Amino acid sequence: MILVENAAIATVDPAGREFTSGHVLVGDDGRIAAVGAGPFTGTAEGARRIDGTGCLVTPGLVNTHHHLYQWATRGLALDETLFGWLTTLYPIWGRLDAEIVGAAAGAGLGWLALSGCTTSMDHHYVFPRDGGDVLAAEIEAARAIGLRFHPTRGSMDLSRKDGGLPPDHVVEDTDEALAATEAAIDHWHDPSPESMLRIAVAPCSPFSVTTRLMTESAELARRKGVRLHTHLAETDDEEEFCLKQFGCTPVEYAERVGWLGDDVWLAHGVHLDDSAITKLGATGTGVAHCPSSNARLGAGSARVRELLDHGVPVGLGVDGAASQEVSHLGAELRQALYTARSRGGPQAMDAREALRLGTVGGARCLGRQDDIGSLEPGKLADLVMWRLDGLGHDGIDDKVAALVFGPPARVDLALVGGRPVVERGELTNADADTLTARARAAHRRLLRVA
Ligand SMILES: [Zn+2]
């Protein structure tokens, strides 16, 4: 048992309950046993007591879009559009192997944990023929850090010779990709409520995947009861591609191939007209909002206010480490708020709504809203205690505002299912210097061989 006391608490529950000084009790089953105002008055014999004075406790942040392997190719193609950036990096990614992906994932997931993330997805879609088991490598990295992990078995099968964007050597045969995706689900996917590992099906994007792979991926996911994810409506170039190739917009294409529904969440959703937003809302299709990546690539800014007003489940994503360099999920709260306000004025989003996107909104995208995303008795004890009494935050009395508007806060404690993954700003289960050294070696080797 763990008992946190004397902390400000934002539960992000449906009633939006907050306490200026309260307690959270975590049971031995890894679930929240109690949360409320003031000190805990029941019996908590044998509990480890943690003093949260000067801190804010929130649900752990949920990262809904990422490409961990890209940690090995950060700082490249810095001034390119998405298509220019991709065509620069595809040949390098074609030389990935399990060691590089494992090293990149370890660094990326360690960094995410230190930024307040307790659950992350990963969209992996590059499977070089002689690269070994890259999916197993990143799953092992997540286990080592201790994060709840939703990796996807992604895919690409539309190369340049067939009218797609990626070069021939980084795509897979359609049947092989589908078979490998099914095998990954059978081998790894755990549907239990406590699950630390769930697989989703994630062909990459309209410009790198055939219509057949999109359609059959949706059929496979539904037959297996797993979720669907892809990139959609990220840039004007993609919209042009869809209009030319399919004679329709990206969302119309998604609808045509069976990709709208409450078991689907889409990365980006930047270029959406009113009818597309209405369709996403009516079908319960989620959006992984990645404001820093969209800004880094100059892709545009998503119409988040309109998405939320239409009931679209919206979560936050850092997106690939190479398309935004920061990969800090805590900082993405502020970026989401600023992006919404830069489009729609100061009323477009407040600090609490930004926190909802980063927590329960993300949980909805991943289909985990019954398990995580808010601090309520019975839910899994995935929580973060942010230190807000230092130079950067002290004096902002509204602690949720301090977290979202202020500089990225230090994570004093992060629990996943009641187990610590970060304590006093350090990883509990891994050494940051070791992760850094391994990732550096992977980056250097990849650039040398590519
Ligand atoms: Zn992405």
Image (cartoon, rainbow, N blue to C red):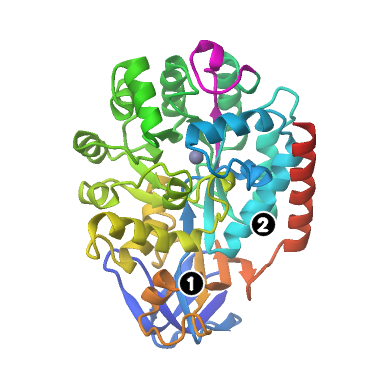
- Secondary element at tag 2: helix
* Residue appearing at x 74%, y 56% in the figure: 435
Image quadrant in which the N terminus is located: bottom right
Quadrant position of residue 223: top left
As drawn, the label of residue 375 is none
Of circles 2 and 1, the one toward us is 1
* Residue 43 spot, x, y in % from top left: 49, 84
Is 169 a magenta residue?
no
The magenta-colored residue range is 151-168
Left/right placement of residue 85 relative to residue 256 reads right
Residue indicated by mark 2: 145
Identify which residue, 196 or 345, lies in the foreground: 345
Determine crowd level at label 2: few under 14, some 14-19, many 20+ residues with C-alpha closer than 10 A.
many
Quadrant position of residue 18: bottom left
Residue indicated by mark 1: 407
Amino acid type for the residue under numbered disc 1: Pro
Mark 2 Cβ inside 8 Å of ligand 1: no
- Secondary element at tag 1: loop
Identify which residue, 3 or 338, lies in the foreground: 338
The answer for how far apart the CA atoms under marks 2 and 1 are is 25 Å
Amino acid type for the residue under numbered disc 2: Ile
* Residue appearing at x 61%, y 45% in the figure: 68
